[in-house]
């Protein structure tokens, strides 16, 4: 008995030596932008819009060139990657929390909370209405059980003092600046702290500068470049005058081979935007992107100054992409490349930088962050661990990416050669098939070609199998009803 007590005391006295043999758990800094197309970032090849702070993170981490969201608008996309389940498992197709569907199963941030982490949200991580919830400073469709602390960032949005113009539905240019999910550009007066994203960065900087008694999971959500395109005036200046912006090519007959369900909900025609307004929309979007990038820089600088940069996994991504006039489409929802593909950068301390061309999905973040931080990866979740691609950027974890659009009931399967788009499960809404090696901008739909029959039938079988797998998960089985931390 005395020998046992002595041994226990020895362990206590030598705690610091023993602790040195046990690796400290890594922190997580998850940064999520809103409505950001990968093509707007200079590290993804944009030569007009400059994003030096995100570029700096990309240079240190792994930049994924073929990352895809699992739903092409905010609510279902965020519900998916934060819960670890595909949309057809949770049946979250709108702007709601995944909690009713997942019951007592832990979300991604909640899982870290259950394993001894602090779990903090700053601004939009689950769905929030932009501009509505940002103007009010409200929680939106947040999941309270995911967090030990949460902070909202209120801002004036389209009401910000400055020079504003409504671009959408304003062919006579006589409408005042207006709110809602509307294309509005505001070159705002004042500094960054006037706006929600400036306040979000300031709060994140404050939190990172504080001592941490436990490892942290810090999720920082920026609402730009989501409409309204509001940014301090200095971020618009590089793009003035806006008529110098270059629009994507306009191809005659571009819509002729696209099924009606594949024509996006916002187009140059439906929004009644002339060429000058379209160019201003691009300039306003780029200004919002550069404003957001500057806020990301403040957060990354604070992480470096905190002394935690070497033990923190940093992720930068967006909930989905965004059209900027390609095919005369604007905004999200479309299953074409600009809307379905997302930027994704992961920096894991101790792992080499790289550029990875493997297909990956946002749902893969849950298992990947768990693995990187030494937590057991829940078997129930539906993503794949990306750690092999972080160790070797030449590794591959998926041959096909899956994406869904609840609004059009459309599906995307994207592999190295093909982009297959099917509207409705029985394909009654139409099909698109693009050869991404010969036609990367998706101008020629090959679905009706005789040579494509075998390819189309193969994708239809693959899609049916995928949907069956997505639905056949533990959400279909009974679970406890009381969710807890």
Image: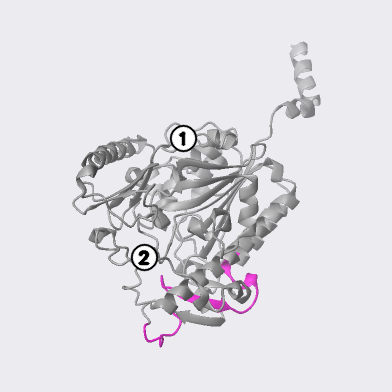
For image coordinates 77% across by 12% down, the residue present is 2
Circle 1 — which element? Answer: loop
Circle 2 — which element? Answer: loop
User: In the figure, 269 relative to 357: above or below?
Assistant: below
The reply to whether residue 204 is visible in this rendering is no
Q: Nearer the viewer, residue 402 or 157?
A: 402
Q: Is residue 167 left or right of residue 413?
A: right
- Find residue 329 and name its label: 2
Q: Is residue 135 left or right of residue 193?
A: left
The reply to whether residue 69 is visible in this rendering is yes
Q: Dot 1 surroundings within 10 Å: few (below 14), some, or many (20 or more)?
A: some
Location of residue 19 by image quarter: top right
For image coordinates 38% across by 58% down, the residue present is 95
User: In the figure, 304 relative to 2: above or below?
Assistant: below
Q: Is residue 375 left or right of residue 310?
A: left
Q: Nearer the viewer, residue 89 or 73?
A: 73
Segment colored magenta: 171-197
For image coordinates 64% across by 77% down, the residue present is 190
Quadrant in which the N terminus appears: top right
Horizontal and vertical percent for residue 228? 48, 71
Q: Return the residue at label 1.
A: 397
For image coordinates 79% across by 26% down, the residue present is 17
């Amino acid at each position: 008995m005395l020998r046992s007590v002595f041994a226990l005391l020895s362990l206590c006295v030598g705690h610091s030596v023993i602790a040195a043999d046990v690796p400290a758990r890594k922190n997580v800094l998850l940064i999520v932008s809103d409505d950001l197309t990968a093509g707007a970032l200079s590290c993804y090849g944009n030569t007009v819009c400059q994003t030096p702070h995100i570029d700096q993170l990309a240079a240190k981490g792994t930049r994924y060139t073929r990352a895809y969201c699992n739903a092409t608008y905010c609510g279902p996309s965020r519900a998916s990657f934060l819960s670890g389940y595909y949309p057809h498992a949770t049946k979250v197709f709108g702007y709601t929390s995944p909690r009713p569907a997942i019951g007592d199963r832990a979300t991604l941030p909640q899982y870290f909370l259950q394993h001894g982490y602090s779990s903090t949200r700053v601004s939009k991580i689950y769905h929030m209405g932009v501009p509505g919830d940002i103007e009010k400073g409200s929680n939106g469709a947040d999941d309270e059980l995911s967090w030990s602390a949460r902070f909202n960032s209120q801002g004036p949005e389209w009401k910000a003092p400055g020079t504003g113009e409504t671009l959408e539905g304003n062919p006579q240019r006589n409408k005042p600046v207006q709110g809602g999910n509307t294309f509005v550009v505001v070159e705002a007066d004042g500094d960054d702290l006037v706006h929600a994203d400036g306040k979000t960065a300031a709060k994140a900087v404050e939190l990172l500068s504080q001592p941490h008694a436990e490892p942290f999971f810090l999720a920082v959500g920026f609402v730009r470049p989501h409409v309204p395109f509001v940014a301090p005036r200095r971020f618009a200046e590089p793009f003035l005058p806006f008529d110098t912006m270059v629009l994507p090519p306009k191809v005659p007959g571009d819509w002729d081979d696209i099924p009606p369900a594949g024509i996006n909900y916002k187009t140059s025609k439906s929004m009644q935007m002339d060429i000058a307004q379209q160019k201003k929309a691009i300039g306003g979007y780029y200004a919002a992107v550069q404003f957001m990038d500057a806020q990301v820089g403040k957060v990354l600088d604070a992480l470096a100054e905190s002394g935690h940069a070497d033990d923190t996994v940093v992720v930068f991504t967006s909930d989905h992409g965004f059209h900027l006039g390609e095919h005369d489409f604007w905004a999200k929802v479309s299953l074409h490349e600009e809307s379905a593909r997302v930027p994704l950068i992961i920096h894991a301390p101790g792992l080499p930088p790289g550029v990875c061309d493997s297909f990956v999905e946002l749902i893969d973040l849950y298992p990947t962050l768990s693995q990187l931080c030494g937590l057991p990866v829940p078997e129930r979740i539906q993503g794949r661990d990306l750690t092999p691609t972080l160790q070797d950027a030449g590794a591959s974890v998926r041959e096909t990416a899956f994406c869904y659009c609840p609004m059009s009931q459309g599906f995307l399967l994207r592999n190295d050669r093909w982009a297959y788009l099917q509207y409705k499960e029985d394909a009654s809404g139409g099909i698109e098939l693009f050869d991404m090696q010969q036609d990367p901008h998706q101008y020629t739909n090959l679905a009706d070609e005789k040579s494509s029959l075998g390819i189309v039938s193969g994708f239809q079988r693959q899609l049916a199998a995928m949907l069956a797998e997505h639905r056949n998960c533990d959400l279909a089985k009974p679970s406890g009803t009381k969710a807890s931390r």
